[in-house]
Image (cartoon, rainbow, N blue to C red):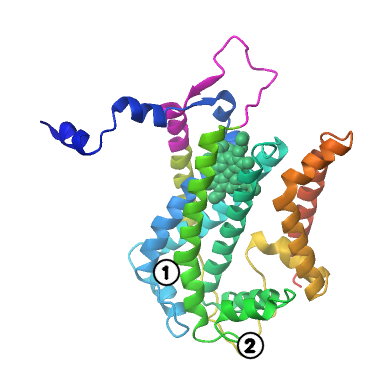
Amino acid sequence: MGLTGWVQERLPISGEQLRELTNEPVPNHLKRWWFALGGTPAYLFVVQVVTGILLALYYQPAPETAYESVAYITNQAAYGWLLRGLHRWGATFMVAAVILHQMRVYFTGAYRKPREINWMVGMTLLLSTLMLGFTGYCLVYEQLSYWGAAVGANIAGSVPVVGDFLKEILLGGDGYNPRTLPRFYVLHAAVLPTLLTLLVAIHIAIIRVQGVTELHFEDEHKDEPQHFNFFPDHLYSELMIGLLMMIVLTALACIAPATLGPKADPLTTPEVIKPEWFFYVAFRWLKLFSGTVAVVSTGFIVFTMFAWPFIDAWIRRKTRYQEASVWIGIFAVLTIIALTVWEAVVAH
Ligand code: HEM
């Protein structure tokens, strides 16, 4: 009995069954990247986990050591600068890929019945990805990390009813203290990645059960097959995209390496406090309205996004505006871009 026989005896899965499991035919439109963008954040998440584990070998999550350990990674550890650069740029690309994927799903109406649950799983993925970005930024313990965390905690504090509790849970006390950084670290390196892994597994399991939305285009030939094989054809495209991503990330990590600003100083508020680019929109919104109004309206917007498949179904049932979602989507995207650019160009 060879090795195959030995394994077969213990795991009685035939090659045929494996092929059936992995070789789901997928619709032709997945040949275009825009429609298969979901694979990109999944790939980038793996890059983040691998580079993150390597960074964790050197990172020390305490106020007295965090900044120095990041400086060590950047300036002394072998290829530390490269790992930091990949992790930083990987985060930016992952957030961008999640947003673009969500836009694709939105504008093709792929969240409609029966995919409402997966849209909501997706929204939780979006929020978890953003939280990963926020907590990671706080770990560097440079001025902006420290004050970013303080501002973030104050925002959590303005949530009605549970605000004080949330703030205390996040900081481990009334204000930033020695227990705060380990909390961000546990969230960033354990809780959120585990949550994301589980959510991606659920997201993909639901996609396997439902299949992706079938979309058709005017230029396609009706007499050609409408599907192609996931394995190896689609997987091969995904691997090529992964390779391209790796080249772009490495180039960016070399051309624009991750920098290190001045060390956190709890006694000196910086003149300008800015979060990462993906929070510009929320930050500008918060500056436009007073604390609680801004937080409650943000909560309402997030709730509306979660419930969008049901709101859209209601609009389609009750009115003759069958594609109102497209115009609402365009308005939302333009508003998000406008607020982001506004925050980017002004100091305060
Ligand atoms: C880490 C984040 C995410 C990963 C790894 C991911 C992964 C994927 C993959 C691989 C697909 C298959 C088709 C495609 O590539 O477009 C997909 C489809 C889908 N995703 Fe995501 N996704 C993520 C975030 C989101 C978000 C933020 C939303 C929306 C709020 C969302 C909603 C959906 C829906 C509704 C589908 C089904 C689309 C269809 O039927 O055509 N996903 N996702």
| Position of residue 61 measured from the top left corner of the image (x, y, whole percent) | 44, 77
Q: Amino acid at mark 1?
A: Thr
| Position of residue 229 measured from the top left corner of the image (x, y, whole percent) | 46, 24
Of the two numbered discs 1 and 2 on the same chain, state the one appearing first in sequence.
1
Point out the stretch of residues depicted in magenta. Answer: 213-240
Instruction: Give the answer, above or below, for where 249 lies relative to 218.
Output: below
Q: How far apart in space, not on screen, are marks 1 and 2 (Cα)?
A: 25 Å
Quadrant in the rendering for residue 296 = bottom right
Q: Amino acid at mark 2?
A: Thr
| Position of residue 344 measured from the top left corner of the image (x, y, whole percent) | 72, 62
Q: Quadrant of the N terminus?
A: top left
Viewer-proximal residue among 247 and 29: 29
- Can you tell which mark lies on residue 268? 2
Q: Quadrant of the C terminus?
A: bottom right
Outermost residue toward the top in this view: 223
What residue lies at 61% left-to-right and 44% top-to-bottom?
Answer: 118
**In the picture provided, is 186 more to the left or to the right than 150?**
left
Instruction: Give the answer, above or below, for where 126 lies relative to 348.
Output: above
- Can you tell which mark lies on residue 74? 1
Q: Is residue 278 magenta?
A: no
Q: In which of the image's four quarters is ligand 1 placed?
A: top right
